[in-house]
Amino acid sequence: MKILIINGPNLNLLGTREPEIYGNVSMEVYLQNLQNEFPHHQISCFQSNIEGEIINRIQEDDFDALVINPGAFTHYSYAIADCLKNISKPKAEVHISNIYKREEFRQKSVTAAHTDGVLSGFGMNGYRLAVISFQAD
């Protein structure tokens, strides 16, 4: 199975960005760990701070399942929500922090309704749990 992970704005800073919230492991290191744990899957990651680039990447349609952490776009990107709505493949939304324990504006996701499930507050392990969820399909 080809699994694509998409990370939105500022998630290129994982490992150094607010480690008390996001931990101190970079996405590159975590991705390598995922690839080692799930060698029968092809797991790749794309990150962009630009909304249109994320939409373009999703529309390339070269994956079997999608894990998306839209970052701040979660709360207001109807464009990404519309894109997700038109993808019929398995998809999961992941948030490293528990968005419901954070500022009020972070507690609303306009993208979540267009995914099969949401993992929030499990740290980087949320990506792993999303991959596991695709194996149940």
Image (cartoon, rainbow, N blue to C red):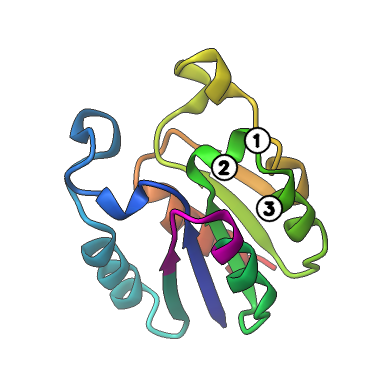
User: Dividing the image into 4 quarters, which one contains the N terminus?
Assistant: bottom right
Secondary-structure class at tag 3: helix
Mark 1 belongs to which amino acid?
Tyr
Instruction: Say whether disc 3 or disc 2 marks the residue closer to the N-terminus.
Output: 2
User: Residue 58 is drawn in which quadrant?
Assistant: bottom right
Please name the residue shown 59% across and 59% down the image: 133
Secondary-structure class at tag 2: helix
Q: CA distance from mark 3 to mark 2?
A: 8 Å
Comparing 94 with 58, the one in front is: 58
For the magenta stretch, what is the residue range? 46-53
Residue 116 visible? The answer is: no
Q: Position of residue 23 (x, y in %)?
A: 22, 40
Q: Is residue 110 left or right of residue 71?
A: right
- Which disc, if any, is residue 80? 3
Say few, some or many: other residues with alpha carbon within 10 Å of mark 2 (under 14 / 14 to 19 / 20 or more): many
State the residue position of label 2. Answer: 73
Query: Tags 2 and 1 in contact by the CB under 8 Å rule?
Result: yes
- Which disc, if any, is residue 76? 1
Comparing 14 with 57, the one in front is: 57
Mark 3 belongs to which amino acid?
Ile
Query: Tags 1 and 3 in contact by the CB under 8 Å rule?
Result: no
Please name the residue shown 64% across and 64% down the image: 55
Looking at the image, residue 49 lies above or below residue 119: below
Looking at the image, residue 18 lies above or below residue 102: below
